[in-house]
Amino acid sequence: MERLMTWAEAAPDLIATAAGRVPADLVIRRGTWVNVHSRECLPDHDIAIRHGRIACVVPDASAQIGPDTEIIEAHGRYMIPGLCDGHMHIESGMLTPAEFARAVIPHGTTTMFTDPHEIANVLGLAGVRMMHDEAALQPINIFTQMPSCAPSAPGLETTGFEVTPEDVAEAMSWPGIIGLGEMMNFPGVANADPKMLAEIAATQAAGKTVGGHYASPDLGPNFAAYVAGGPADDHEGTTEADAITRVRQGMRAMLRFGSAWYDVEPQITAITEKGLDPRNFILCTDDCHSGTLVNDGHMNRVVRHAIECGCDPLVALQMATVNTATHFGLERELGSLTPGRRADVILTSDLKALPIEQVIARGKTVSINAKVVVDCPHYDWPDTARQTVHLGHHLSAKDFEIAAPEGANAVRANVIGVIENQAPTKALQVELPVQDGLVEGEGDTCQIALVERHRATGGVTNAFVSGFGYEGRMAMASTVAHDSHHMIVVGTDRDQMALAANQLAKIGGGMCLYKDDELLAQVELPIAGLMSDQPATEVAAKADALIEAMRACGCTLNNANMQHSLLALVVIPELRLSDLGLVDVRTFDFIPVFEPMT
């Protein structure tokens, strides 16, 4: 891939082209210029591009056209900046950076700010470097945030690797590192934990942005302490009050609309009804699985959704372009169709429906009518990244037994309650029966197990979960288990749970579902147990088959596989399961699986 010139390298030719002294490489003619700085639509404008950057936007670029200048006729269509995703995890798409780029280019995404903390938990700094290096090969802009929290909650989980302040300081020197990834250890920041503050200080010393993650409804002193600790944005808001409070305190409110997170609608009223300044609001996806990317879109989907929620189309575009670029200190580099910026342009005939008809990135056409016309190069992933599932021994049904207190005929269990389309869970208490000394699931409550897979300890931590609606003899297992990425197994039958867990060890990671001793569906994710280097269409087809298998077992939740993957996320309330036990995230402490019967 041809290297993009820096502005300093390109400036003499950009000036000469703008002045009409040197022809442009490309001119987009007779379009409607969507200016996200002034929030205007200006018809009959041309964009002249040189060295992958915009030289000028003028009513007539005839003076910039030479015999070798490429011409694209806009025919009056809207010319809008390429879309930016302000916060997301490539691994959530179950794709490598190359295949994720190939999947989102047709949807008009030309810039992503990615936090690879999933792979950091499995492979440490080396894994982050692999993601960074493949991202650098792509024809679009993929900036990497150095993960801040591995483990996300020290003392409550065991990860494959631990991120240190020294790791953060080293990564800040890498060319594609844009800042610090989401600071999930919000209690640590609020209590001035030296390690967290050292990571933030290293980032700020490098002049880069600190990402936030405040997953608590408490907007009192703890939130004030967290903001004082340095995080500059937050995507965990779910209410209008969350969004308002964040921007009032000088943070950027990132409103997410991913595969399973529907947090734009309840927060965008801060703009549409309360009239807050939209410059401090950013749209993002956080997590999008491959099926969403293939079937529904990416940032174009988020922008359309914001418009459907009552947002002015131009404001929605600002929230997915210039606002995002400004937040990361890149306003002079991208996010708008103005001189000097990277020539990332979308041609569309409708600002509300937002059909993505042509995508230009760095001055080159990368997609026409949803077809990618450039290569997305792959990194050569080593064996260390492909052999990451280590169980220690072949699992059996006995590993998933939950013994009842001696003499008990029934127990009162603390149960994780899944909430559809939201990251938080509910802390439930459910009375469960005892049979032959073992506690059994009943009704909508089934078993969940966290299987250690990084150090081959053979450890299995068992508890209960409710909300999936599973019926019959079944189990689903996944090595996508945010954020520690051990293995989560959910099932109604211990034999099926063992089958599913052993199958993932055999294939090197992924997701699978067994019913009545039969493998119904499987998604192979051999890279860190998180990603496939196959095309998104193939991964999406397997993921769709998995969801159908879940439905065949009684589960009707939207994007239930993503709900499954978050059950070990010990930084989001209320209850989660780690390799060390059942965690009450409201208090950041372990609680017993069973409470005294009353």
Image: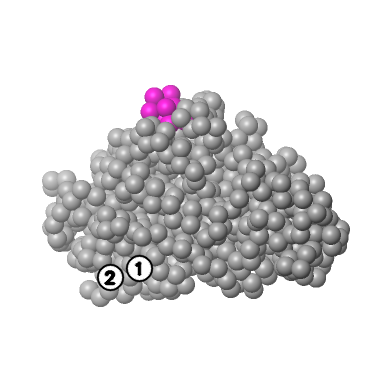
Please provide percent x and percent y for residue 447. Answer: 28, 57
Q: Amino acid at mark 1?
A: Val
Q: Tell me what residue is drawn at x 31 percent, y 62 percent.
A: 526
Q: Tell me what residue is drawn at x 57 percent, y 48 percent.
A: 86
Figure quadrant of residue 399: bottom left
Q: Amino acid at mark 2?
A: Tyr
Position of residue 502 in the picture relative to residue 229 (left or right) = left
Is 364 rendered above or below residue 430? below
Judge whether residue 121 can be spotted in this image.
Answer: no
Q: Tell me what residue is drawn at x 49 percent, y 43 percent.
A: 175
Mark 1 or mark 2, earlier in chain: 2
SS type, badge 2: strand
Please provide percent x and percent y for residue 481. Answer: 35, 53
Is 528 rendered above or below residue 194? below
Q: Which quarter of the rendered picture does the C terminus lie within?
A: top left
Q: Which residues are magenta?
A: 192-200
Mark 1 lies on residue? 523
| Residue closer to the observer: 573 or 254 | 254
Figure quadrant of residue 278: top right
Mark 2 lies on residue? 514
Judge whether residue 135 can be spotted in this image.
Answer: yes
Please provide percent x and percent y for residue 63. Answer: 84, 59
